[in-house]
Image (cartoon, helix red, strand yellow):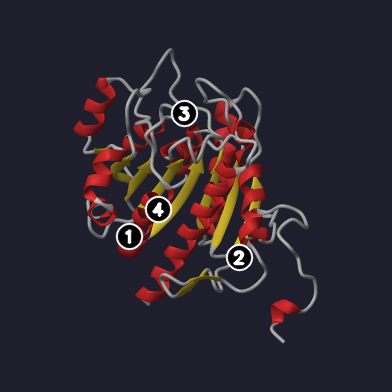
Amino acid sequence: MHGYQSGRLNLPFTGICTFAKAPHVADWDALDCDVAVLGAPFDAGTQWRAGARFGPRGVREASTLFSFGHAGAYDHEDDVTYLDGVRIVDMGDADIVHTDTLKSHANIRAGVEAALKAGALPVTIGGDHSINIPCIEAYEGHAPFHVLQIDAHLDFVDERHGVTRGHGNPMRRAAEKDWVSGLTQLGIRNVSSTAKEGYDDARARGSDILSVRQVRKLGPKATAARIPAGAPVYITIDIDAFCPSIAPGTGTPSHGGFLYYEVLEILQNVARHHDIIGIDLVEVAPDYDPTGSTSILAAQVLMNLLGFIFHARAAAK
């Protein structure tokens, strides 16, 4: 009898929700894992619809769909069992102090730093896109890396009315860091929260900006190949990069977005050729999607991406 057929069946809809039903480790000084998942339920950086504070809960609940108790996840197209033996833990959530962006961001940064100290891959679930700011700040003193942003919006606003840490600012804040060597920004389209000056600034700093249509014309392999060869990569995924027909549960939906396999194949190609040193996925606001499809999409993307990363690491040994 296979080991997973003994004991409890432990179906996806039973038990306490953690990401992929992984163990919850509340003591951040005791992390011993390959992947450390942190919730960052902060959405005070939003400029329109709030609700991404419930993103971590929504994505965690959806992720249980992909945790059937047996080892790994077999993909018949790739003929690979992904995630077999990969040790994932759920750190719980960073403490959010309502109305206090700086304190909330500091608490998120502390969580990412704890994951890095443990030698784990940090995976942060937002929250609005401002949570990327403390995530990137947590890498201060680390070797330089490239940022891959998959998003509908450029998020390259410098400052508006004194606001420098809202969800329109993260890629500008990242570009300012000595430890960020460049940005690739994919999916940027149509009416945007960033004015022309922001695009000019981003390009002047070396950003490579592609719309959904430009990515489709290039294809996933050629798109991924635009990232500098050999560069470590931090991946930030805004769920509004996807078409709202499949991801309506977000604060600032933008039509004309990516479909699932377009993003998945880009991520798979990037994971094959680059060391992925961190991930965040943001802007899932479950209350705008009563079907739960947006949360399921987010969880599915993360689970597959983790599979790609650790399969590539194993193959490189």
Neighbor class of circle 4 (other Cα within 10 Å; few <14, some 14-19, many 20+) is: few
Side of 67 where 76 appears, left or right: left
- Rendering coords of residue 116 (x, y %): 50, 55
Q: Nearer the viewer, mark 4 or mark 3?
A: 4
Query: Callout 1: helix, strand or loop?
Result: helix
- Rendering coords of residue 49 (x, y %): 55, 23
Spatial CA distance of label 2 from label 1 is 28 Å
Residue occupied by mark 3: 167
Neighbor class of circle 1 (other Cα within 10 Å; few <14, some 14-19, many 20+) is: some
Query: Callout 3: helix, strand or loop?
Result: loop
Whichever of labels 1 and 3 marks the residue nearer the N terminus, that label is 3
Q: Tell me which amino acid carries mark 3.
A: His
Whichever of labels 1 and 4 marks the residue nearer the N terminus, that label is 4
Q: How many marks?
A: 4
Spatial CA distance of label 1 from label 4 is 12 Å
Q: Tell me which amino acid carries mark 2.
A: Asp
Q: Residue furthest top?
A: 161
Q: Is residue 271 visible?
A: yes
Spatial CA distance of label 4 from label 2 is 32 Å
Residue occupied by mark 2: 32
Say if mark 1 contacts mark 4, CB within 8 Å: no
Say if mark 1 contacts mark 3, CB within 8 Å: no
Whichever of labels 3 and 2 marks the residue nearer the N terminus, that label is 2
Residue occupied by mark 4: 261
Residue occupied by mark 1: 269
Query: Callout 2: helix, strand or loop?
Result: loop
**Relative to 217, residue 268 above or below:** below
Q: Tell me which amino acid carries mark 4.
A: Tyr
